[in-house]
Image: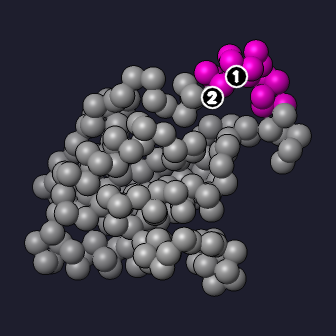
C-alpha cells in the first residue's frame, strides 16, 4: 500500500516512532486483530475520511475506544475520498490525515483503504465491535452484517451537532462570502 512506500522513503515525517508504528497494512492489521481476539481482547473498528480533524472525530474515536480494548481505524485513501466526496475533497492529503489520527492516544492502529467503503476490510479484520457516528442509521452501517453474524455488535455513537467536516467547510465558506462552486473551482485549479 502507498503508506508503506511513504514510510520507506522517509517522506512520512512522524513526530515519534510510536505514531509510525501504528500504521499497518491490511495483512498486518488482520494478524494483529486475530492475535488480540485469541488473547481475549475486544477489537473495535471504526472508519472515516477524517478530513479536517475536528471535535466530532475526537468524540467518536474516544467512544469507539471505550467500547473495547484495541481500536483499529480504517481511513479512506485520497482516491477513495475523491470517489465518494467529489473532486474538491479531501482538503488534507492522506499523509497528513494518517499522521493526525495515528497521533491520537486512543487509536491503536490505522489502515488505509482505497475502496469507497470498508466492507472488505471489515470482512478481513472481523472486529468484535463496529463503531460509527450517529449520523449513520444502524441499518446503513457498512459491515454491520459481518460483525453481527460473527457474534459482535454495532455501536452507534451519538452525533455531535455542528461538528462535521461538511458543516465546517460551510461555515468557512459563509464567513468568507464564498459559494461552494467557487471553492470547488479553486480546489480543482490547485490540483
14 is higher (above) or lower (below) than 76: below
142 is higher (above) or lower (below) than 2: above
Question: Dot 1 surroundings within 10 Å: few (below 14), some, or many (20 or more)?
Answer: some
User: What is the span of residues highlighted in magenta in the rendered image?
Assistant: 170-185
In this rendering, position of residue 129 left or right of residue 110? left
Q: Look at 64% across and 72% down and name the residue there.
A: 12
Q: Position of residue 20 (x, y in %)?
A: 50, 75
Report helix, strand or loop for mark 1.
Answer: helix
The quarter of the picture where residue 162 lies is top left
Question: Dot 2 surroundings within 10 Å: few (below 14), some, or many (20 or more)?
Answer: some
Q: Identify the residue position indicated by label 2 in the image.
A: 169
Decide if residue 113 is in sight here: no
Q: Position of residue 97 (x, y in %)?
A: 57, 55
Question: Which residue is at the far front?
Answer: 15
Q: Look at 67% across and 80% down and name the residue there.
A: 10
148 is higher (above) or lower (below) than 43: above
Report helix, strand or loop for mark 2.
Answer: helix
In the image, residue 175 lies in the stretch drawn in magenta: yes
- Is 24 in front, or is 19? 19
The quarter of the picture where residue 18 lies is bottom left
Main secondary structure of the magenta stretch: helix
In this rendering, position of residue 118 left or right of residue 158? right
Whether tag 1 and tag 2 are in contact, CB under 8 A, the answer is yes
Q: Identify the residue position indicated by label 1 in the image.
A: 173
Cα distance in 3D space between marks 1 and 2:
6 Å
Amino acid at each position: 500500500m502507498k503508506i508503506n512506500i511513504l514510510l520507506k522513503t522517509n517522506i512520512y515525517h512522524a513526530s515519534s516512532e510510536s505514531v509510525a508504528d501504528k500504521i499497518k497494512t491490511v495483512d498486518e492489521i488482520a494478524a494483529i486483530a486475530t492475535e488480540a481476539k485469541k488473547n481475549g481482547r475486544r477489537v473495535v473498528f471504526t472508519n472515516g475520511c477524517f478530513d479536517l480533524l475536528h471535535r466530532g472525530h475526537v468524540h467518536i474515536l474516544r467512544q469507539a475506544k471505550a467500547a473495547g480494548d484495541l481500536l483499529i481505524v480504517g481511513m479512506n485513501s485520497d482516491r477513495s475520498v475523491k470517489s465518494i466526496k467529489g473532486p474538491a475533497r479531501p482538503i488534507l492529503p492522506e499523509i497528513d490525515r494518517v499522521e493526525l489520527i495515528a497521533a491520537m492516544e486512543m487509536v491503536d492502529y490505522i489502515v488505509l483503504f482505497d475502496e469507497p467503503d470498508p466492507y472488505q476490510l471489515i470482512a478481513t479484520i472481523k472486529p468484535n465491535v463496529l463503531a460509527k457516528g450517529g449520523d449513520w442509521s444502524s441499518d446503513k452501517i457498512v459491515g454491520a452484517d459481518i460483525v453481527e453474524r460473527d457474534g459482535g455488535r454495532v455501536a452507534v455513537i451519538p452525533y455531535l451537532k455542528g461538528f462535521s467536516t461538511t458543516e465546517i467547510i460551510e461555515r468557512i465558506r459563509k464567513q468568507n462570502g464564498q459559494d461552494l462552486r467557487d471553492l470547488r473551482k479553486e480546489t480543482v485549479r490547485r490540483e
